[in-house]
């Protein structure tokens, strides 16, 4: 074991993941990716591309393969250093699927039925309400628990899944002794981008499946981003003021501007006092363009270097598998499975 690995293992552990079911969005960036970068020096971080989760909805195989590579490139382009973080693909570490099955047997039907993401996704995919969609949270629990993660940095929409993961870990530990670290969700304040809303319906989360214009993607060209912000839905009173209930569109734009510029709401309000929404929307669009520009350029360059990307995810999968297998072995022993 190298000195670097020994030092890494002393730090508290972080696990998080993103689905390659679509391109990464402004929401994935503010709710998670931006924070991942800030945490990389103090924690031993495992950042995963959760391709097994992505197949709970139908994927075109060629698109999925391309998006997985693009996602690794975007992780690195956002500032995640592959030498400090384990950046890997979920399907490369078999322990995820194996532990997920065991955890299915420690998760109640009622618990899974109450998950809002399951309810939302099954309402949107009435033709394909598969068992994987239902047991999605147990796979997510396996992801987290395999690495004995202390913290799980996610956006607000994933809080319920992390809570369920804690309940599963506590239930398992209650029966078998302290096998799993019980993790905590690490969620930015909602005003700091924990919940970025659609630009065309600000009462709905910005998600990869948004209709055109509602969602902004990390790799979007500047003109597309500016156009989406120009058309963002606001309200009719013309005042730039933070009030999620009365002014969801303007408040969403203020949160985004606050994340991309580091300005407080008071500063934003005085900056745009007396100006119309037009100037404000343009400024928000510009700030997103400038935040994403270096990321897009770096990601595009990295995509040209497939050898490097392959090296990154292969090394990472080897390291992740070693850590994950240690936990899986412990669990299998507790289950009473005969050792190989
Ligand atoms: P996913 O791929 O939907 O989203 C990735 C991350 O981005 C956050 N996020 C948002 N934050 C703020 N506003 C938004 N509009 C927005 N949209 C997305 C999400 O909260 C998430 O943190 N189930 C997870 C992936 C996963 C996972 C895990 C996460 C699988 N296993 C283990 C943590 C730990 C998901 O679907 O994320």
Image (spheres, rainbow, N blue to C red):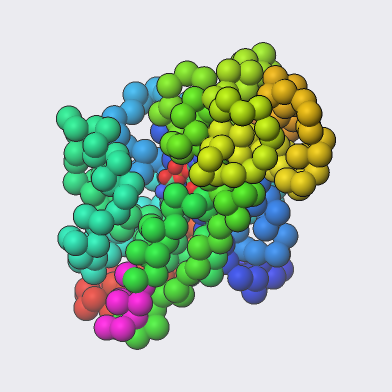
Res. 276 image quadrant: top right
Q: Which of the two residues, 100 or 36, is positioned nearer the viewer here?
A: 36
Above or below: residue 45 compared with residue 327: above
Residue 15 position within the rendered picture, expressed as x and y whole percent measured from the top left: 52, 58
Characterize the magenta stretch by its predominant secondary structure.
helix
- Kindly identify the residue that appears in the image at 19 percent across and 32 percent down: 126
Report the label total.
0
Tell me: residue 331, above or below residue 222.
Answer: below
In the picture, residue 189 is in which quadrant?
A: bottom right
Decide: is 288 above or below 174: above
Q: Quadrant of residue 231?
A: top right
Query: Where does the image place residue 201, in percent across and percent down from the top left?
Result: 46, 29
Q: Where residue 305 sits: x, y (%)?
A: 65, 27
Q: Quadrant of the N terminus?
A: bottom right
Q: Is residue 131 left or right of residue 173?
A: left
> In terms of depth relative to the viewer, which is nearer, 169 or 249?
249
Location of the C terminus by quadrant is bottom left
Residue shown at 27% from the left, 65% from the top? 103
Q: Position of residue 261 (x, y in %)?
A: 77, 39
Residue pictured at 40% horizontal, 65% vertical:
163
Taking the view exactly as shown, the residue that stands out farthest to the front is 237
Residue 305 part of the magenta segment: no
Q: Is residue 111 visible?
A: yes
- Would residue 103 appear left or right of 31 to someone viewing this image? left
Q: Is residue 271 left or right of residue 145?
A: right
Give the magenta range. 168-175
Left or right: residue 223 compared with residue 323? right
Residue 257 position (above or below residue 137): above
């Amino acid at each position: 074991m190298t000195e670097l690995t020994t030092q890494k293992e002393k730090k508290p552990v972080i696990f998080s993941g993103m689905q390659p079911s679509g391109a990464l969005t402004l929401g994935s960036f503010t709710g998670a990716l931006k924070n991942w970068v800030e945490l990389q020096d103090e924690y031993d971080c495992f950042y995963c591309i959760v391709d097994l989760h992505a197949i709970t909805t139908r994927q075109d195989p060629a698109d999925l393969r391309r998006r997985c590579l693009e996602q690794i490139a975007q992780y690195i382009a956002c500032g995640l250093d592959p030498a400090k973080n384990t950046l890997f693909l979920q399907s490369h570490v078999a322990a995820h699927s194996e532990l997920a099955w065991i955890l299915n047997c420690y998760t109640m039907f009622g618990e899974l039925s109450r998950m809002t993401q399951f309810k939302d996704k099954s309402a949107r995919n009435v033709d394909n309400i598969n068992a994987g969609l239902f047991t999605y949270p147990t796979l997510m629990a396996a992801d987290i628990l395999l690495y004995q993660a202390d913290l799980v940095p996610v956006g607000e929409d994933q809080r319920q899944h992390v809570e369920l993961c804690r309940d599963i870990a506590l239930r398992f530990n209650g029966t078998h002794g302290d096998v799993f670290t019980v993790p905590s969700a690490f969620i930015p304040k909602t005003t700091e981008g924990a919940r970025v809303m659609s630009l065309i319906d600000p009462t709905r989360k910005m998600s990869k499946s948004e209709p055109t214009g509602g969602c902004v993607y990390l790799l979007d060209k500047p003109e597309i981003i500016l156009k989406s912000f120009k058309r963002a839905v606001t309200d009719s009173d013309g005042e730039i003021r933070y009030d999620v209930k009365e002014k969801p569109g303007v408040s969403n734009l203020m949160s985004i501007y606050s994340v991309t510029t580091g300005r407080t709401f008071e500063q934003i309000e005085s900056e745009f006092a007396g100006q119309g929404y037009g100037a404000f929307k343009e400024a928000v669009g510009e700030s997103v363009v400038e935040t994403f520009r270096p990321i897009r350029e770096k990601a595009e360059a990295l995509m040209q270097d497939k050898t490097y990307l392959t090296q990154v995810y292969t090394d990472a999968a080897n390291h992740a598998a070693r850590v994950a297998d240690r936990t899986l072995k412990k669990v299998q022993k507790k289950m009473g499975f005969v050792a190989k």
